[in-house]
Amino acid sequence: MRILLLGGIGEALQLARRLACRHELTYSLAGRVRPRADLPYVVRVGGFGGVEGLRDFLRRNNIELLLDVTHPYAAQISRHAVLAAKQAHIPVWAYRRPPWQPEAEDNWQPFRDWSELRIALAAFSRPLFTIGLEPLRHSHEIPPDQHWLVRCLETQPEPSPRLTVLNATGPFGLEEELHLLRHWQVDVLISKNSGGKAVAAKLQAARVQGIPVLMWQRPELPAADEEFDAVEVIAGRLGC
């Protein structure tokens, strides 16, 4: 079967390796992700040009199944996948990674957008952001009584005495996260509810330290033809 897999997360790589043994697989990555050189299948890097571009790619390459195994917050590509697959008259299956659930000792406060987050941040002085590059777009808004610590992929922001950027990617261990919180005297953690194990230790560290978590709520994703909460099930359905 000719399959296009929209990836970029660890589970996508895991699934791609299993499918490559018996399917003709193309693995698609966003342009900001660096592909590995040892992958046993075709790797495509970059965007498609919207819904129409993705639809045309599916038709031009005779794709028979589209797999959406993207990040839970990559709502745009998930929407494009459903629309393009419908226009190309092929099925789209989606992996929906289960979200994290708070434990009894956790203090999670939900927010939906930057406006809500900015209001919630007023009560704190040393936040740690783990939500990507978005805080850097608002670095000019940092109040005089706050210092922002932003952990994200490699980037070079404008220098600011009230901003520190840590270029790092997971997985992170509990002791590593505890040291980070203590060293930087973090008093609030800002996180996406990404799910998975790679960066979950930050939530455990916040729990140990008694630090509240401002949790960015997940975007609503479109319904795929079939949805799965484990990539092993997808592999099994495809005989791998």
Image (tube, helix red, strand yellow):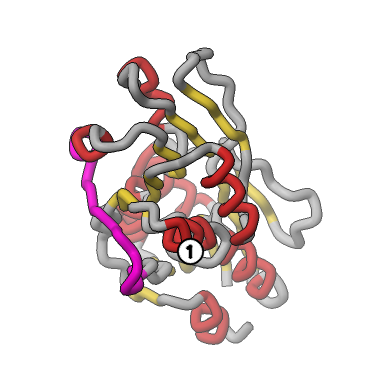
Q: Tag 1: residue type?
A: Gln
- Which residue matches tag 1? 204
Q: Residue at x 29, y 55 (%)?
A: 218
On the question of residue 93 being in view, the answer is no
Viewer-proximal residue among 211 and 4: 211
Q: Residue at x 35, y 32 (%)?
A: 125
On the rendered image, what quadrant is the C terminus found in? bottom right
How crowded is the residue under tag 1: few (<14 C-alpha within 10 Å), some, or many (20+)? some
- Residue 104: say if magenta: yes
Q: Residue at x 37, y 39 (%)?
A: 50
Q: Quadrant of residue 105?
A: bottom left
- Residue 14: say if magenta: no
Q: Quadrant of residue 165?
A: top right
Q: Secondary structure at mark 1?
A: helix
On the question of residue 201 being in view, the answer is yes
Residue 95: image location, x then y, percent: 43, 69
Viewer-proximal residue among 92 and 72: 72
Q: Residue at x 41, y 34 (%)?
A: 126
Does residue 70 appear to the left or right of 114 in the view shown?
right
Please say if 183 is above or below 79: above
Viewer-proximal residue among 86 and 151: 151
Residue 57: image location, x then y, percent: 48, 48
On the rendered image, what quadrant is the N terminus found in? bottom right
Residue 132: image location, x then y, percent: 46, 39
The part of the chain drawn in magenta is: 101-117
